[in-house]
Each structure stands twice: as structure tokens, then as C-alpha cells.
Amino acid sequence: MKIALWGAYQQGNFGDDLMAAAFGSQLQEMGHQVTVFDLDQRECLKYGLTTERNIDDLVNWCDVVVMGGGAVLKNAQYLRAFLNPKARAIELRFFSLARALKRYSRPAYAVSIGSDGAVSPNTISFFRRFVLQSEAFRNCTVRLEKDVRLMESLGKKAKFVPDVLLATSDLFNLKPIVEKQPRVILNLHKRYADIGARIVDISGAYSNIEVMTFDTHFADYGLNYEWKYEVVPHVSYAGTQATLQLLNDSAAVISSKLHLGICGMSLGAAYVCLGGRGKVFEQLTQLGLQKSSYWDPADLSDRAIQNFFENISGLRDEQQAALKLVSKPALGHFAELQEWLQ
């Protein structure tokens, strides 16, 4: 079967591109022919995938569209979409997908999608609802339990399966390194620069720990919202495989992002989220980790940062216990795909 894999793969971003790699590779192993919508060519070459930038050509070519991961159930931000060309382009891609599905009469499914701020159908942007409530959209798996009800309120079936990237080590055949480097990766939005500087300053009391900053987009995409700090080493994003290796060899990651953190957890690193969006807090809550693994930037004390550096191994052990319950079930997305595509 010819599968069009569609997602937010246009920003050279670690989390989205890794989901494209995971679903694309697994669909190929199932015996399907896969073309990914607008995935960076560097990533395609690493995973033996092909890409197509024209949505009409892609949907016309395929038998089925699979929407692979992402915060599809996102709250409407019409003013932001009006003011920000990149945000507007994201919303218009949903409209273009819905139009192509109707024009070429192709079915669509979604795997490991989630909400981010949406609490009812009317809070989801119109362009996204245009896809989700279309006749073409058949079924989906969602990464938050509460999103089953949200999809049902849209008139569609859904099954809860834990976020696919909670199974990163299994999906990419990476055995977590036990003796990791005493390295802490900082991946923060520039709005948290002051807190980042505090973290670096406090880390100086722990001579065995190296702190570095990291960004999650290819530099040539021009997205420069992530923080760098001249007093510590910085590593620029060089693709999903290099990032997985870095995570696997690091003791911990502090990030505002969801998938950098849970991939780190899957590879045995401790993860703390600093002020991440609603989807991150909800994922940590679902795992029972919101108290230990989420920092509210409004009331983050120096003592909390010190406790982190003094108890990285303890935090890692708590997270590994939680992960043990969901990492194998997180592979269930592929069983659902297998059933839908028969």
C-alpha cells in the first residue's frame, strides 16, 4: 500500500522529525511504500525515506494518509496565526490537507496525536477541525487519555496509547548507556534566559557536572528562539540520530520541550521540564511525574535547582519506574496501524 505520512515536518525540528522517522520506518517494515510530506532531505537520507513537498501530488499518489504525531488538537490562536507567518503556514497546511483528501477521495488516520490547550471542539482551530471532522478522517490513537473524550466530542473514534516516543530506545534499537557522562543538557526558550543563567551559576558548585546548551532545529531553518549562553559549551542540532546519541550519553536534560525530554527518559537520562506548554505538564501528570519533573518558572527556588543536581540519579530512578509501565504499551500504535491498513 502507498502511504502518505503527514505531519509538522517542515521546521527541521527534533521531536517532529523523530516521529516521522519512527512511523516511516515502521510502516516500511510492514511492507508499505512510504512518502513523507515535506521532511528535511537530510533526515530522509538517514532513514531511507522519500519526501514530497506538494500536498496535492502526495495525496493523489497515495492510497491512505497517516498523520504521524504532534499536537494536532491544538487550541485556536487566530491572532497569533494572523501576525506570525510561520504559525499561519502551519494552520493553512491543515486546510490544504483537508482539501486534498476531499479532492482525491483518500482516507486518513492519525497516530500518537495529542491536545495542547484545547478542551472542547470549539477551542480547536477551524482549520484542524476541517480535517478531523471530515468524512475522510476514519480513526486515531491519542497520547493523552483525556483526548479520547475530546475526539468523541468531534464525532470520531479514538484509542488511548501512550506517546510513541516513550518507546524511543526500542524503536531505534538503542540500548541506554548505563555509565553516562556527568552532562546536563539545557534546552530553553530565550524567555527563560535568566533562569538558565541561574542554573549554570548553581552548577558551578558541582565540579563533576558539565552543563551545555542545545537547540532542537537545524540552523538553516532560521528559528532562533532557543537560548545560548556564552559561558558554557553549545551544541547545535545536527539531526535526530546525533541528538539521540547525545541524549544517550548524558545524565540529564532540562528543557521546555516535550519530546526532547521523554526521549531522554527513554534513553535513561533524567528530565526536568522548565515552563513547558500545557501538553508537557499533562504528559508528566499522566505519568505521575508532575511534582518531581516540572519546574514552574514563577516560583523556582535556588534550593530546587540544587536538589536537582544533588539527586539526578534518584530522579532518574523514579522516572524509569514510571516509564517501565508505558514503554511497551507505547508500541501499540503500530498494532492499530496494522489493523486499519489491512
Image: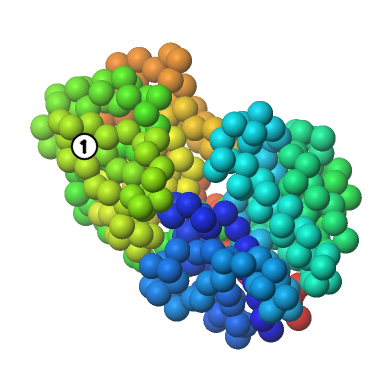
Q: Quadrant of residue 254?
A: top left
Q: Is residue 72 above or below residue 242?
A: above
Task: Give the quadrant of the N terminus.
Answer: bottom right
- Local secondary structure at mark 1: strand
What residue is shown at x 21% (from left), y 22% (from top)?
Answer: 202
Residue 158's quadrant in the figure?
bottom right
* Above or below: residue 335 compared with residue 80: below
Query: Is disc 1 surrounded by few (<14), some (14 to 19) or many (20+) residues within 10 Å?
Result: some
From the viewer's perspective, is 190 left or right of 73? left
Residue 196 to residue 340: above or below: above
Q: Which amino acid type is shown beneath numbered disc 1?
A: Val
Q: Position of residue 208 (x, y in %)?
A: 12, 37
Residue located beneath label 1 in the image: 211
Residue at the extreme left: 207
Residue beneath the point at 57% across and 66% down? 53
Q: Quadrant of residue 243?
A: bottom left
